């Protein structure tokens, strides 16, 4: 139980980072698509003004931005997963040490220790991921209240 808050926090941070970086990746991809669509749509104009090199450099610049976002995404994903695994393996060690101590003293059965161990571990992860779900529910409730709001105008 003592590591449950750490597991919940690591699960929350991992989910939050993944959601934020997915959003950033979408933005970069949309910018690249807009740039490519502009050039392809006006191909005759680009060629007539000899701006192929300029447009190529502009698109490459957008690709560099996306590459930087991808590297940052990978870094934070790795750190989040690493922190989560560190906490999880420390929990394993603590739980099995204390469980072995209780078994040695005859206060608990090995099956009871494993059941408690996995319940705490899975519950902690669920609590960490539930925080993001509550955030989505809150947004949905706000949107629903907007759509279900009774109209105040007269239709006469």
Image: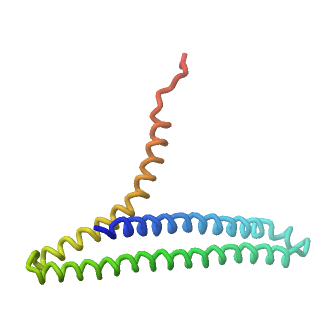
Left/right of residue 152 with respect to residue 123 in the rendered view: right
Q: Position of residue 140 (x, y in %)?
A: 45, 46
In which quadrant is the N terminus drawn?
bottom left
Looking at the image, residue 137 lies above or below residue 49: above
Q: Position of residue 138 (x, y in %)?
A: 44, 47
Q: Position of residue 102 (x, y in %)?
A: 15, 78
Towards the viewer: 2 or 144: 2
Name the residue rendered at 46%, 69% in the picture. Answer: 14
Image quadrant assignment for residue 3: bottom left
Towards the viewer: 137 or 147: 137
Name the residue rendered at 56%, 78% in the picture. Answer: 75
Name the residue rendered at 48%, 42% in the picture. Answer: 142
Query: How is colour applied across the structure in the image?
Result: rainbow
Left/right of residue 11 with respect to residue 17 in the rendered view: left
Looking at the image, residue 154 lies above or below residue 147: above
Left/right of residue 155 with respect to residue 118 in the rendered view: right
Looking at the image, residue 148 lies above or below residue 82: above
Direction left: furthest residue: 106
């Amino acid at each position: 139980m003592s590591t449950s808050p750490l597991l919940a926090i690591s699960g929350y941070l991992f989910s939050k980072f993944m959601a934020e970086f997915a959003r950033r990746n979408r933005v970069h991809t949309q910018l690249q698509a807009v740039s490519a669509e502009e050039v392809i749509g006006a191909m005759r104009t680009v060629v007539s003004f000899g701006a192929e090199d300029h447009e190529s450099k502009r698109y490459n610049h957008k690709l560099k931005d996306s590459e930087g976002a991808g590297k940052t995404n990978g870094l934070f994903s790795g750190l989040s997963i690493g922190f989560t695994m560190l906490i999880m393996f420390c929990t394993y060690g603590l739980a099995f040490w204390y469980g072995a101590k209780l078994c040695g003293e005859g206060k608990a059965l090995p099956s009871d220790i494993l059941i408690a161990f996995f319940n705490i571990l899975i519950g902690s992860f669920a609590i960490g991921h539930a925080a993001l779900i509550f955030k989505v529910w809150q947004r949905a409730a706000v949107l629903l209240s907007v759509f279900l709001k009774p109209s105040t105008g007269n239709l006469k």
